[in-house]
Every structure is written in structure tokens, then in C-alpha cells.
Image: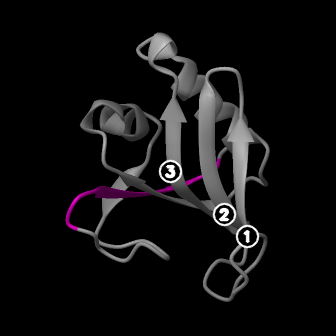
Amino acid sequence: MAFNSQTYQTEFGTIDYCYFPALDDYPKGLLVFMGSYIEKKYRGAGHYRDMVRTLLMSFPEETIVHIPIENKHILNMYLRMDFKIVEKIEFWGSPSNAKLLSGIIKHN
């Protein structure tokens, strides 16, 4: 599996991720978030949520998404987006300093 780190960047901040179009365990593709940063002056205004939604819409429907969350303030946002807390995710395994989430891209 070739590791292909990329960055989605806007005026508000960045989201680092890796995307794999098709793998044996993920035939519809796998998107793994690697980290993110929002400029302090834009925090709390919904820009991160909009960035995540825009990024997810740029990938095929039914792609599996894995996200490690260290920031407890955004955990509920992902839970409202139908992500589920899981025990481990690709590349990250089971770090003790993060909640691990898994979800499926739906374009509706």
C-alpha cells in the first residue's frame, strides 16, 4: 500500500489525509485523516465542519473513512455525521491519546 499524504487547504486551515482508491479490505476505497489545523481566528464558526464535508464530497460514495480525534471539541461533530467510535483504524492502530472513528461517505 503506497502512502500518499495530501493536504486539503483553504483560507481557514488544512486537513492532511491519505486516499487509497481500492484495497483488498476496502474495495470502495479508504480515506485516512492524518491531522488538521484551523487558524485560531476561524475556530468555532463552523469552517472546519464545512471543510470536512467538502473534502468528503470529493471522494467516491461508499469510501470508508478513518479519523483519529485528539480534540474532544470536534468529536460530537463527527458523531452527528454518523461516524462511529472504533477500536483501531488503518495506519494509526489503537493510540491511547485519541478517539478513533470510522464512517462511510454518503453523498446526500
Which of disc 2 and disc 1 is earlier in sequence?
A: 1
Crowding near pointer 3: few (<14 within 10 Å), some, many (20+)?
some
Which of disc 2 and disc 3 is earlier in sequence?
A: 2
Quadrant (top left, top right, bottom left, bottom right) of the N terminus: bottom right
Q: Secondary structure at mark 1?
A: loop
Mark carried by residue 18:
2
Q: Is residue 1 magenta?
A: no
Tell whether 74 sits left or right of 105: left
Name the amino acid type tagged 1. Asn
What x and y, as percent, mark residue 34?
A: 53, 57
Instruction: Let me know if residue 107 appears in the view.
Output: no
Question: For the point 34% across and 73% down, which residue is it?
Answer: 88
Whether the residues at callouts 1 and 2 have beta carbons within 8 Å, the answer is yes
Note whether 16 is above or below 107 in the view shown. below
Note whether 70 is above or below 108 in the view shown. below
Name the amino acid type tagged 2. Cys
Q: Secondary structure at mark 2?
A: strand
Q: Which residue is mark 1?
A: 4
Residue 54, picture quadrant: top right
Quadrant (top left, top right, bottom left, bottom right) of the C terminus: top right
**Residue projecting furthest to the front:** 40
What x and y, as percent, mark residue 49?
A: 53, 27
Which of disc 3 and disc 1 is earlier in sequence?
A: 1
User: Which span of residues is magenta-colored?
Assistant: 96-105
> How far apart are the alpha carbons under marks 3 and 2?
10 Å
Q: Which residue is mark 3?
A: 35
